[in-house]
Amino acid sequence: MEPVNYIQARDISKSYGEKELFRGVSISIAQGQKVALIARNGTGKTTLMNILAGLDQPDQGYCTYRTGLRIAYLPQEPVFDGGLTISETLLSADNEQTRTIRAYEEFIADGNNADNPGKAGKLQALIERMDALQAWDYEQRVKQILTMLKIGDLKARVSSLSGGQAKRLALAKVLIEEPDFLLLDEPTNHLDIDMIEWLETFFSRQKITLLMVTHDRYFLDAVCNEIIEIEQGQVYSYKGNYAYFLEKKQARILAGQVRQEKAMNLLRKETDWMRRSPPARTTKSKARIQAYHELKDDAKSTQEKTAGEIRMDMARLGKKILELQNVRKSYGPIRVINDFSYIFKRGERVGIAGPNGTGKSTLLNIITQGLPPDAGKVITGETIRFGYFRQEGIRLDNQKKVIEVITEVAERIRFRKDQSMSAAQFLRHFNFPNHMHHDRVEKLSGGEKRRLYLLTILMKTPNFLILDEPTNDLDIDTLNILEDFLLTFPGCLIIVSHDRYFLDRLSEHLFIFRDVGDIKDFPGNYSEYRQQQEQKTPPVRKQQKKEERKPRSKQKTKRTYREQKEFEALEQEIRNLEIEKEVLLEKMSAGKLNSDELIRASERYREIEKLLETKSDRWLELSELA
């Protein structure tokens, strides 16, 4: 039986002013397909996704959809009504299931209803309707999604969320809606590795049809069964995973090089013939001259060759590199770094991994002396020259040309004693072709701006590179170039990244931030670390052991109605407190709070810890009852 065709895009083209993003693109997605869309930054991936979602119109061509198809779209930068609460935003879908859940939640939230016998009939009707719609499973699924994406305080206004929190909220919303077809633009941005691995499993197990743009190659490999690549206006389809895509793309490139070599040989032959000034009198001569000009145009439009390998030079590196001695850092009562010591050696490559809010950025700021430790020493060698790529980036002058941003750093970049490269050549190597060199920064996409910022760091020939989430918004082609570039970097390298492929390829060992203040040095890459963790038996919670020692014979065996409501409320309260605790820690670790704000945040943190202990004990007690 042929799969149901969900969406077809036929010969669509789109331009903005003089810039043509793509021409004659055709894509077809059928039920059950999980497709990744790969293309370079600035070639219109987001524009294409907007067209497929019906939010934009192509200049030419058309899209057709299966009748009644329900589409959910996760944009790269979601926009919400800031006046709504998180709960209102998540349950804004107008269907019978969500309407019934809203009615049930409102009824339960009204404490007077539980003790009012006259309301019992309404409650029973709501429960029966929830049963008929299987809304209990829906509600449980919603709770799971919110917990894994660390979304709490459902009464908070959307306007209070950061950009990363808004992206996670948008992701939760599209997952909760359970559409027929999912369009996802960079779904792993602003997620930590634990969230990405959960989402990977979620998509792998669900019968979902999706098209997504992503630079996360492990995520792509685990989720997608087909890859569509758009390159120089041409669409290439690969039925397989990322490894299969690389193999077939390399074969296509090699075949193209053979054809190009044959074309160049023919062009040289025809050029020699043209130089003899053939008279264009006969039909045969005119046809040959026309064919010559077409061949010449084809030769100009052949695929740009990637620059060869560059072995980066750097400032001289002495014997003493960097030493951390018993470094401590606290924010109020929270010790983010606890007695951390380490001696860096020449050429060392360290990856840093761990949940958000555990002090990763704090350590980087201490290393680069942007933040003083509370105790301990940071001893930096006299020859050390840091290159620090910050996650938040820098503000580039939008009115400057791309080439001007680079030449302000250096006119030429030295790689070896006998090798250098002009600023224009360096731009071309990192996928900024000639026609973009005189574009103003304001015309660049978000990924292109981050790539340009990265180049300004690399050009300064540092001998100690620190890269904080460098892969966000970069396309896969650029990531491969960057990885090849960094593999030849002879200095020290520290990488913070949620991109497991990037960490595996470039790091020799890891600093694992397991909890606040707890940093472990693991001798291997991230995949090896995960393999070791999976082989371990999960530790039993201390509270559980305590509860197991209680004499069960004296305990009740069933929860009352009121205890059931308390049990459900405790689950939400504990989740909200855990998320508030993490948010507070992130704020304190960022170093942006004044002394009064820091004191208030610290007091609230201590209060949350006490509340969590009390509520967790009560939850465990109620969980023993059926």
Image (cartoon, grey):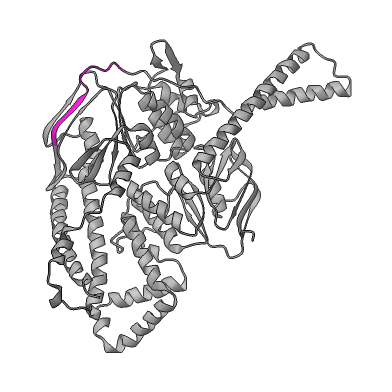
Left or right of residue 94, residue 101 in this image:
left
Please state which of residues 523 and 373 is positioned toward the viewer in this rendering.
523
- Dividing the picture into quarters, in which one does residue 517 lie? top left
Q: Residue furthest right?
A: 282
Left or right of residue 118, residue 262 in this image:
right
Q: Quadrant of the N terminus?
A: bottom right
- Dividing the picture into quarters, in which one does residue 414 lie? top left
Q: Residue 345 placed where, x, y %?
A: 24, 24
- Dividing the picture into quarters, in which one does residue 624 lie? bottom left
Seen at 27% across and 82% down, the residue is: 113
Q: Is residue 36 above or below residue 607?
A: above
Q: Quadrant of the C terminus?
A: bottom left
For the question of whether residue 470 can be seen, the reply is no
Q: Residue furthest bottom?
A: 118
Please state which of residues 549 and 583 is positioned toward the viewer in this rendering.
549
**How many labels sit on residues?**
0
Q: Is residue 290 above or below residue 89?
A: above
For the question of whether residue 97 can be seen, the reply is yes
Q: Is residue 270 above or below residue 503?
A: above
Q: Residue 276 placed where, x, y %?
A: 79, 11
Please state which of residues 334 and 322 is positioned toward the viewer in this rendering.
322
Seen at 37% across and 25% down, the residue is: 458
Q: Residue 623 placed where, x, y %?
A: 22, 70
Magenta-highlighted residues: 315-327
